[in-house]
Amino acid sequence: MAKINKDGFFDVDLPVQLLPQHLEELFNEGGWSTLGKYRSIAPLINSKGEKDPYRKTFAETYLFESKGSDDQHRYFGFTTGYGGKVTPFGEEPVISKDTFLGELRDVTPNGAQVPKSVFEVVVKPFVPSSLLVYRENGDLVNPKETPFVVDGEKGTITFNSSQEGKLRATYALTDNAPDLVKRLWFFTFEAFIPTKLILRSELPDQAELIDEPGAVFRFKIRPGNQRIKENSYQFFETVDGTVPIDPADYTVNHDEGTVTFKDGTEPLTLFADYEIEAVKDESGSFGDIEVTPFDPKKPTELMGAAYNAFRYIYPSIPTAVSFIPQQELGLGWGRDSQVYFWGNITKDRLVAYFRLDPAPDPDSTYFAPIYIGRLSTIGKTPRMNNVLIGGSRSEDEITYSDNLKIGRNVVDYGVNTSNGNSSVLIQRSVGGAMYQKHYLAFITHDANVDPSHESRFNPSVYTGKYHISPMYLVHPADGFVGRLDEVYAIHPKNIAQLDELEVKETSESEHVGTGDGVRKEFHLFHKPVIDEDTEVRLVSDTGCTTLTKAEFVEFNPDEPPTEGKFTVDGANKKLILGGSPIEGVEVIVTYNYSQTYRYTLADTPRTPFRLVNMSPYAPIGLGFLKENL
């Protein structure tokens, strides 16, 4: 069942334990396809400085892409971290059979030749000895009477005989199981290359000698769907690279990760530069990528692990989104607790809010905002029109500093580099500058006239209506750049969280662009109601051509309008003309629109919507599109 209505609005309850997977499904439904996903993994280091083979830390990352209605490609990702805990025996977190997480999923292979049944737990890995399996009627399955084999790491229970009906289970989780999601870090980038470069590694540390004829090394390929990339390797007998080995003297098997020397002898000291590439499986996953040890509780280390797994081209400083003000969740929240997530998503942009179930402690659950994607503009647009805004607690914000590195990536784009928390981030400005600070702008009275925040302001005593304004982004050098798509600034006066406002207005003489002799499509700020007031004016120095409802034709993607006609692609708010206005002709549109907007006020400390140096009135609430009436 679809979670998003025809106008992009959604209001869903997502399980905090499975939040990343459910966000992926929602983003996919909203027009953002999965570019890839992977886990960066690293072993814990014990008190002796040795790697712990059983306990690890994880950075789970999901990447998305969309081709917008303006034909621009946009990319973003998010990361969450967990692991690194050492839980005493008997104190492991337990999944109960009576929660939805206690369901067992039937994963028996299709066409299995033997009468077996294979089931999988929802959360893994788990402690095998803790498993209790129940039938749908609540009866405990006795493993002596109905034998089964347990694989705690894979999370599977394999019965020796076919099983009918649904099964449930109670089981304890290991320290490597995913933790409850308490915060996310969103980021954008210009390109993503699923390869990892291994530089000048001495192969005894990276490879093992295989006991078979000839000097054969098997590279220790990282876990996951990975292989050695063709033409990416060089071998040397000295670390300074002064004695390269002739490529004619060895062969490489890329899939198996082996190199064989033809003379059958092992080089005395062997070094290599090579590149590992990952291949997606059917679910879009690149699998697990081993990285250097990191602490998932430290944002820069966590995101360093995410960035180190593969090659990112010009990634941003990540933007934090926090659900709670404290580091850990209290016992009032369980693994089956809900995260409320509501907003509006299209293939152009996402604007939304998170809130963890407030029942245990409303003061400890943030209304956490996120905006990703397109800025509505006229005329010149940002070179890469991709905005990122989030909201977090102070401890989760990754702040700018000179020569800041996250993983191997330098993310210092100048003294005004934005992180999306302390300021608004635009991927590339009109002039091409990357990730520069931008500021909010909207129609408001001076905040100094209301220092106590006790004024009424809404609704107006003149009209009885609420004052709302489009929310613009500005830059000191560029001026007004554009406006957030289908978003209004709403003063937090005499209005409650999640209230809805009905907007019925006429967009009078909306300038949507200038002709260049080729372009036929122009973006409107809203989906218009086509009526007798609808008017498209093509204005030049020599005169004006006016198109009215009489020249309107219903939108058909396979039949563009003919010369002298126009149509509107309502889903993408596109005005499509039957001819291309010549260079210099201004396209001006008047139309009515009727919409409903939902109001929410962010309360995370680190968000531009609450910072007095970023917003002309702080705090400021947002209204985002719910429905076209």
Image (cartoon, rainbow, N blue to C red):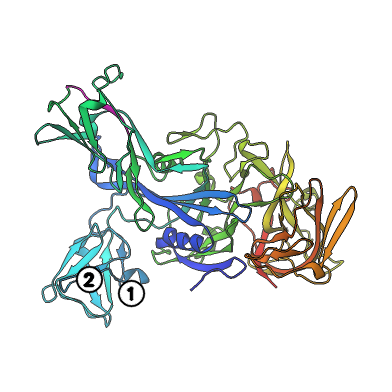
Q: N-terminal of the two: label 1 or label 2?
A: 1
* Residue type at tag 1: Asp
Q: Quadrant of residue 422?
A: top right
The total number of labels drawn is 2
- Of tags 1 and 2, which is closer to the observer? 2
In the displayed structure image, the side of residue 28 where residue 249 appears, left or right: left
Label 1 CA crowd tier, 10 Å (few <14, some 14–19, many 20+): few
Left or right position of 215 against 565: left
Residue 64 lies, with reference to residue 235, above or below; the image says below
Query: Which quadrant of the structure image shows residue 424?
Result: top right
* Residue 493 sits inside the magenta stretch: no
> Which residue is identified by label 1?
98
Query: Which element type, helix, strand or loop, lies under badge 2?
Result: loop
Q: Residues within 10 Å of mark 2 (few under 14, many from 20)?
A: few
Q: Residue at the far right: name it.
A: 542
Magenta range is 268-274
Q: Position of residue 60 (x, y in %)?
A: 39, 50
| x then y, percent, for residue 157 | 21, 67
Give me the residue at 69% from left, 55% from top. Answer: 620
| Camera-side residue of 442 and 593 | 593
Which amino acid does the dot numbered 2 rest on?
Gly
Quarter of the image with the C terminus in it: bottom right
Q: Which residue lies most toward the bottom here? A: 137
The residues tagged by marks 1 and 2 sit, at their Cα atoms, a distance apart of: 31 Å
The residue that label 2 is drawn on is 111
Q: Residue at x 53, y 45 (%)?
A: 188
Q: Secondary structure at mark 1?
A: loop
Query: Residue 19 placed where, x, y %?
Result: 44, 60
Q: Which residue appears farthest toward the top when viewing the image?
A: 242
Residue 551, horizontal then vertical, whole percent:
80, 67
Foreground residue, 160 or 151?
Answer: 160
